[in-house]
Amino acid sequence: MDKWVISINKHYLKYDVALICWIMYSMFVGATTVEFHKYISNGWYFLSLILLFWNIINIKALWSNYRNILGVLGVLIVTAVATVTSKYPPLFAWALMIISSINIAHEHIVKLYFRCFVFLCVFIPALAITGLIPNYVLDTVGSTGIRTSYGFSHPNVFAASIMICIICWCYLNWKKVKVYQVILINIIGYVIMRLTDSSAATIVIVFITLIALLERWFDKKGKLKIWYVIAAGLLVFCPIASYYLMTNFSMLNDGMLALDLFASGRIRLMNSFYLNYGWSLWGQEALFDMENRSLLLFALDNSYAYLLIQFGLITTLMYYLGIARELKQAVKYSDNRLIICIMTFVIYGLFENYFFKTQFNFTLLFIASSTFSPYLAPQSNNVNDPIEKRRFLQKRYNS
């Protein structure tokens, strides 16, 4: 039962309010059909920034070392520049979210995400079903029928929200997943696929639940190395493969046409955005043309192409280096469930652009603790120290 209880204490309260405020803002304003006046949405955005800033300022240990100060300022400067050049305000908030999470236990963050998305996946469809907000109904890519959003801005967003709930559930119940639970979850996943026609989310649900079920049956020492090698390999392969297909796609290549068909036209869309915008060091504003769909500029669903085109090479490399550092720390602390969750999001990034968005990918919030914790002043016999706390939590988890 303690896996589901979020303890309310002074240390976490400011962070909890800030994180929930941003998740709810980004989902209600940016991912649902709920309409807000611009003054309300802008005020909500700036309130979220203030709360996140306040959390960062109050992490005293973070400011006690010049490496931390230079690192935080460097990240904020890079993201601020990329935010201006790309005209994409959420990017700066994502950086604040990551930095403010440095002193927070991973499991606590996942609990917050789980509860937020369970609420969203119940409340938003209820509003749509009762007719209080619009419910988008779209034609499917093939001939399977229609797809519905149930109050979310797109059917894929609804499916992704269900997927986040399931990934969080698997994380919180690691080593305790039962066969009947996997069957039940995948039945839910199948129903969601029939409603939204979102195959990518369904594949991820099947993948993460089966791995969560089978992971405990592997050799303890061997499985850590196996998962790390696979995750690190995917972190290299997925962006490189995406960029190769993005820059070299040709309608005359039968192999690429087959891959594009499998990916529901995503490769052609990547190539179209690349030909129109290219890439830069600091990013640019990529405009989505929903009216003239023949230009193939109405969607960019590959996370790696989106990162490079919209936010630029420097921000993209910063993401990859941060995730690589996080993987290294996960191996150091034998955190298999984190490695597999990272691997899951990396794969999902091939088909949707939610991989780099912190309101969906909770593993991004662990980057700061993996990057700055080694430079925080150690406090012996104090589990509130980020390094000692993680060792304590990991020891308790493995017991």
Image (cartoon, rainbow, N blue to C red):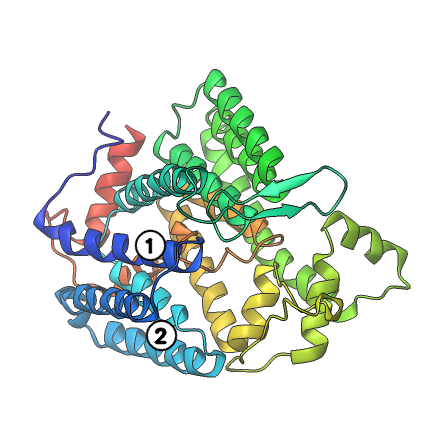
The image shows residue 187 at horizontal and vertical percentages of 55, 24
- Left or right: 16, with 336 as reference point: left
- Toward which corner of the image does residue 350 lie, by quadrant? bottom right
Mark 1, residues whose alpha carbon is within 10 Å: few (<14), some, or many (≥20)? some
Q: Which residue is mark 2?
A: 75
Q: Residue at x 26, y 31 (%)?
A: 4
- Toward which corner of the image does residue 119 lie, by quadrant? top left
**Which secondary structure lies at badge 1?**
helix
The image shows residue 211 at horizontal and vertical percentages of 52, 31
Amino acid type, residue under disc 2 in the picture: Val
**Mark closer to the chain start, 1 or 2:** 1
Asked if one can make out residue 390 in the rendered structure from this viewpoint, the answer is: yes
Pick the residue in front: 312 or 388: 312
Q: Which residue is mark 1?
A: 23
Pick the residue in front: 147 or 25: 147
Labels in figure, total: 2
Give the farthest residue toward the top.
Answer: 180
As drawn, 275 above or below 179: below
